[in-house]
Image: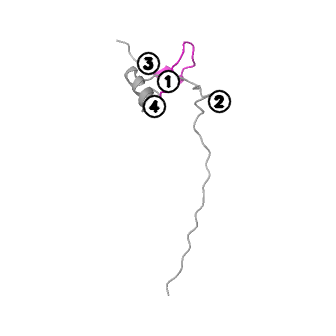
Amino acid sequence: MGRVSTTTTKTIERPDVREETSTGDGTPKFFHYVRKDKILNSAVSGEYVVALCGETFPVTKQAKPGSPVCPDCEKIYKGLRRK
């Protein structure tokens, strides 16, 4: 007869290194700069948008004046030439 082999499966634990992007009440920690033409579509369809900083997410909340802005998005936005 043939040789019997056994296979074992191990779970490798790794820490979640993503930055927390929302507060406990669901409000985003930072608001990101996103193309205006993509915001409404994302809010309606749930499609993900890509912020200037590269983060992807569905639009669920609208920023209010004085809301905290993602530092990376703000830096990139200020570096863009305005026409």
| Residues in magenta, as a range | 56-78
Which residue matches tag 4? 54
Cα distance, mark 4 to mark 1? 10 Å
Quarter of the image for residue 69 reads: top right
Cα distance, mark 2 to mark 4? 23 Å
Which residue matches tag 1? 32
Tag on residue 46? none
Cα distance, mark 1 to mark 2? 18 Å
| Three-letter code for the amino acid on which mark 4 is drawn | Gly
Q: Position of residue 14 (x, y in %)?
A: 61, 49
Q: Which one is earlier in the sequence, the residue at label 4 or at label 3?
A: 4
Secondary structure of the residue carrying numbered label 2: loop
Give the color scheme: rainbow, by chain, secondary structure or one colour: one colour
The stretch drawn in magenta includes residue 12: no
Which residue matches tag 2? 24
Which residue matches tag 3? 79
Secondary structure of the residue carrying numbered label 4: loop
Q: Position of residue 47 (x, y in %)?
A: 42, 33
Cα distance, mark 3 to mark 1? 15 Å
Front position among marks 1 and 2: 2
Using the image as rendered, state which of residue 59 and residue 35 is in the foreground. Answer: 59
Whether residues under marks 2 and 4 lie with C-beta atoms below 8 angstroms apart, the answer is no
